[in-house]
Amino acid sequence: PFVNNRWLGGTLTNFRTIKTGLERMRQLERMKEDGTYQSITKKEVSRLEKEHERFEKYLGGLKNMGSLPGAMFVIDPAKESIAVQEANKIGIPVIAITDTNCDPDKINFVIPGNDDAIRSIKLITTHVSDTVIKGSQHRKKFINRDDQHGDRRGDGPQTKMIRDGRGRRDDGDDHRPS
């Protein structure tokens, strides 16, 4: 899932409402595919197409998102401050390319870099996406191994989060001092 247009306020904090919009977008796509458009007037088809285009513009990247994400990757946290605030509010970790004009305290995992240069963004996002894909494949391999060997949880790879110079095992609780 991705957002490359304007971030809609409440996308994460009001996800239940966003899910109804996503369902409406899928319904409009099904109507177009199953031939429902042939049985209604041109004016109605035009109205439905405009509605679908609006959904596609603002929610198109979220089309396949069925639940809240496990993490959020942000290119410019200063520009996307609403998205960062929402993620922080509901406890979604934020990974961000952070320039000198950004507050790193609001970001869980800071990637120092130029968030204005296209080459820099492309380089960093390519490496991050490749790493996520490799990690996902590695995780699936260990899950399949655990299923075959009696579900021995904890034997697979463990993540270690390093924050403020202290390493700890990632068990989902973030005990950051306020």
Image (spheres, rainbow, N blue to C red):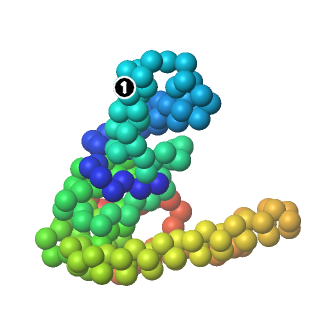
| Residue at image location 23% in from the left, 77% down from the top | 117
Residue 50 percent across, percent down from the top left: 35, 33
* Lateral position of residue 109 relative to residue 158, left or right: left
* Lateral position of residue 5 relative to residue 152, left or right: left
Q: Which quadrant of the view contains residue 17? A: top left
Is 27 situated above or below 5?
A: above
Is 171 situated above or below 132?
A: above
**Residue occupied by mark 1:** 47
User: Considering the image in quadrants, where does the C terminus appear?
Assistant: bottom left
| Residue at image location 23% in from the left, 69% down from the top | 104
| Number of numbered markers | 1
Q: Is 92 or 54 nearer to us in this picture?
A: 54
Q: Inspect this view and state whether residue 49 appears.
A: yes
Q: Inspect this view and state whether residue 89 appears.
A: no
| Residue at image location 44% in from the left, 59% down from the top | 71
Residue 111 percent across, percent down from the top left: 32, 77
Q: Is 10 or 122 nearer to us in this picture?
A: 122
Q: Is 39 or 99 nearer to us in this picture?
A: 39
Q: Secondary structure at mark 1?
A: helix
Residue 28 percent across, percent down from the top left: 50, 31
Amino acid type of the residue that numbered disc 1 sits on in the rendered structure: Arg
* Lateral position of residue 101 relative to residue 55, left or right: left
* Lateral position of residue 107 relative to residue 155, left or right: left
Q: Is 40 or 73 nearer to us in this picture?
A: 40
| Residue at image location 69% in from the left, 67% down from the top | 140
